[in-house]
Amino acid sequence: MAEQKRYPTEPLKCWNRSKELRAKYYKDYVEAKEKGGLRWSGSAWAFHALPSGLGHDVYSVTGEPYGATSAYYSDFSLQCLQTAEKAGIARDLCGYLRNYWGAILLDKFIMPDGSILDGWPKADFLFSSHVCCSHSKWYQRAGELEGGVPMKAIDVSVGPYPNVPDREGALKYIISQMEDCIAWMEEVTGRTYDDALLIEAIHEECRSLSLWAEISSYNKNIPAPLDEKTMFTLYVHTTLNPQVKEIADYYEEVRDEVKDRAERGIAAVADERYRIVTDSQPPWSALKFFRYMEKEYGVVSVGSWYTFGLTGAWDETEDGTLVPRKTPREMGLSLNTREEALRAYADYRLRNWGWRFFQSIDERIDITNKIVDQWKADALISHLNKGCEGTGIGQLEGRLALLERNFPVMTYEGNMADERDFDLDRTITRVDAFLESAGLKPLNTNK
């Protein structure tokens, strides 16, 4: 057997900063009331920039990342899930939602380091986008559990934008809801809205999302400068507070470092010899299976539509190449008024891959094919995720489309947020069989 090529590798310099920013995000939320600030909670897909017009002292905690953090600490997650079930909440609902509601019922709050605080930090208002069937109901019920917290959501179900028959109508529908939300936020908080702060936040949010797409695009390189497990830690800020300048500035640092790694051939996995992509949230309590594939087989997961496009901003060239979308500033748009700002913001955010996937199987198949080709993947590993019905839409149709072109696909069952639905040993066995059927033998030949 030919000697396996080994690539140079080195630790990420930006790694610790990511963890610091995440800890700060949750600390700011918990301590907001002590400083006279406002707290809001809602979906990671919310229009983050909108509440920014209420002031610089407005802090959020987004539900899906909170649910994922809970799932990572499986003992706490189990308490939340069982508490939710005892309250009559069905197990087939969103896994994140059940962790979130369960924590409210327990009156406890988990921090990124695993420490558990007594007392759920009550929000001043709840604000979400409505993408999947549970988003609005998630926060409506959360508001009731928190004792009557007001809630507002923006319905983004306009079809797979921009490929909709009436693009202008879709934009007007979203913009009108944004206007309603601004008036509502003024009413429920008693604050006067500042359009200058809104415009500033929109620019920073678009910068964050475009930079994340650029960072992800460097994983087209061989060897990949990042692995997906690492990307889970890096991408999360786009789902927490992308509208904050500190976050956009951080993503510039990450972009510069990852670009340098790609140019110098620095690998995330020194033994990279097989590249996969995934297609859903991972089982957060068992991320070790990514490291298993890397260590045992030299397999690197270079990403997924989820990691790249949950919030990353993408565009396509005429030949179908996926490229980072230009920000409003880069497009030469002048956002001098609320109307101009909201229009540019709505157009930017509606292009989200996740929203399009929830509304069109054809879009999912098309983008998945482009990802596996442009990121030079050898296979797709598909998590049939019982914890999220939305990301399951079109999943098996996408599998069939790949198999029709003789592209290898492995599936496994699990749940992003409920470890009781995931069997690690069984999944490892499936991984072994799949990779060995692809001709890979373990790197450790004594195995």
Image: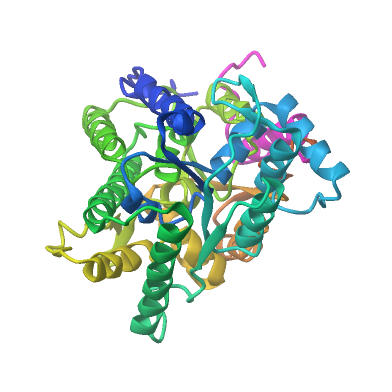
Residue nearest the observer in this picture, 447 or 142: 142
Left or right for 59, reference 266: right
Residue nearest the observer in this picture, 407 or 287: 287
| Percent position of residue 254, x then y | 28, 32
| Percent position of residue 300, x then y | 48, 33
Residue nearest the observer in this picture, 234 or 147: 147
Left or right for 262, reference 46: left
Residue 422 lies in the magenta-colored region: yes
User: Which residue, as the protein is rendered here, is positioned at the far top?
Assistant: 446
Q: Eyeballing the image, is 140 above or below 415?
A: below
Tell me where the magenta segment starts and ends, as one range.
421-447
Query: Is residue 192 at least partly visible in the picture?
Result: yes
User: Which residue, as the protein is rendered here, is positioned at the far front?
Assistant: 190
Q: Give the residue at x 45% y 33%.
A: 32
Residue nearest the observer in this picture, 139 or 190: 190
Q: Eyeballing the image, is 401 above or below 170?
A: above
Q: The C terminus lies in which quarter of the figure?
A: top right
Q: Give the residue at x 61% y 65%.
A: 394
State the image quarter where residue 257 is shown.
top left
| Percent position of residue 342, x then y | 30, 66
